Image: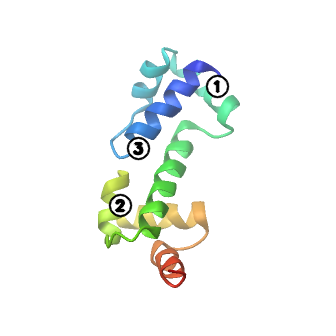
Amino acid sequence: MDHRIQRAVQFIEANYSKDISLHDLTKCANLSESHFLYLFKLEMKLSPAKYLKRSRIQKAAELLRSNEPLSIKEVMTRVGIKDKSHFARSFKQVLGVAPSDYRARYANRG
């Protein structure tokens, strides 16, 4: 993987709960916006926005599977998503199931 894209991915993984702009990522990678977008998609097979969304949803899924009794709103806040309908829609789009159903599925396995 290109080291500049790797730095951007590491930045996303370390800061997924914060607002991350394209400017933040291009600055981190030390690339122009157009070149960054081209390289990121080439390397990751996703746009930076889709990668960030997928990372947030995967972190949310980890929190929902954990034994920590967090509300859906607390999970959303921890992963940097502010709108509940956006969170539910994104979660279902990425994992194929609603957050509450996902939690219930893993609660029944414990």
Do we see residue 42 in this rendering? yes
Q: Position of residue 4 (x, y in %)?
A: 55, 19
Nearest to N terminus: mark 1 or mark 2: 1
Q: Position of residue 54 (x, y in %)?
A: 54, 51
The residue to which callout 2 is attached is: 76
Nearest to N terminus: mark 3 or mark 1: 3
Q: Residues within 10 Å of mark 1 (few under 14, many from 20)?
A: few
Nearest to N terminus: mark 2 or mark 3: 3
Q: Judge whether 32 appears above or below 83 on screen.
A: above
Q: Judge whether 56 appears above or below 28 on screen.
A: below
| Residue under the point 49% across and 65% down | 89
Front label number (1 vs 2): 2
Q: What type is the residue that disc 1 sits on? A: Tyr
Instruction: State the separation of the CA atoms marked 2 and 3.
Output: 11 Å
The reply, left or right, for residue 48 in relation to residue 66 is: right
Labelled disc at residue 61:
none
What is the image's colouring?
A: rainbow
Do we see residue 81 in this rendering? no
Q: Position of residue 61 (x, y in %)?
A: 49, 63
Labelled disc at residue 38:
1
- Identify the element where label 2 is drawn: helix
Q: Residues within 10 Å of mark 3 (few under 14, many from 20)?
A: many
- Identify the element where label 1 is drawn: helix
- Identify the element where label 3 is drawn: loop
